[in-house]
Amino acid sequence: MSEPLNDMINRQLHHRTIRYFTDEPLPQETLTQLVAVAQHTATSHYLQSFSVLSITDRHLRGQIAAIAKQPYINQNGHLFVFVADQHCAAVIAQQAGVSQTHLGSTDKFIQAVSDAVLAAQNVVNAAESLGWGPCCSAVF
């Protein structure tokens, strides 16, 4: 394989997932930047039908870790949860007097899941570029 074209590609080619964390909290500026990265994720339907939950409470992270059977979730300083979410689109449709029936389609659900996954991956790339060691886990 030839040399990577840039720092981002090099970082992605050398990615390793390590599930050992410190409980160091992320600085507010970093949190703001990472959420902005998630909000700027490109989607094919222009819906961005996902929500990001930002969780710092150790007790809540412990409950999530137990449900997910992933104890390392409670060993970090911050947890983002990306959720496929069509609620905002439903509220907007309702306020506009537009039918919400098409929001319940399989296509819209798959799009919401895809949007959440794309946003999560963008945040992972951004966090790694800042020197943080993120890890993704999927729980359905």
Image (cartoon, rainbow, N blue to C red):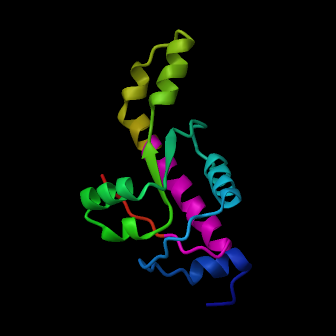
Q: Residue furthest top?
A: 97
Q: Residue at x 66, y 56 (%)?
A: 28
Which residues make up the magenta segment? Answer: 112-134
- Left or right of 19 in this view: 36: right
Q: Residue 124, how many percent across, how many down? A: 56, 65
**Observer-nearest of 106 and 22:** 22
Picture coordinates of residue 41, whole percent (x, y)? 62, 50
Q: Is residue 137 left or right of residue 54?
A: left
Q: Nearer the viewer, residue 52 or 6?
A: 52
Quadrant of the snapshot with the N terminus: bottom right
User: Is residue 128 within the magenta segment?
Assistant: yes
Q: How many marks?
A: 0
Image height of 126 relative to 83, above or below: below
The single residue placed furthest to the right in the displayed view is: 6
The quadrant holding residue 70 is bottom left
Q: Please, is residue 56 above or below residue 19 in the view?
A: above
Q: Residue at x 39, y 64 (%)?
A: 137
**Placement of 93 over or under 20, stated as above or below:** above
Q: Position of residue 103 (x, y in %)?
A: 43, 27
Query: Left of 130 or right of it: where is 19?
Result: left
Q: Is residue 2 rendered magenta in the image?
A: no
The residue sitting at 43% across, 35% down in the picture is 108
Q: Position of residue 114 (x, y in %)?
A: 47, 49
Question: Magenta segment, principal secondary structure?
Answer: helix
Residue at 45% x, 29% y is: 87
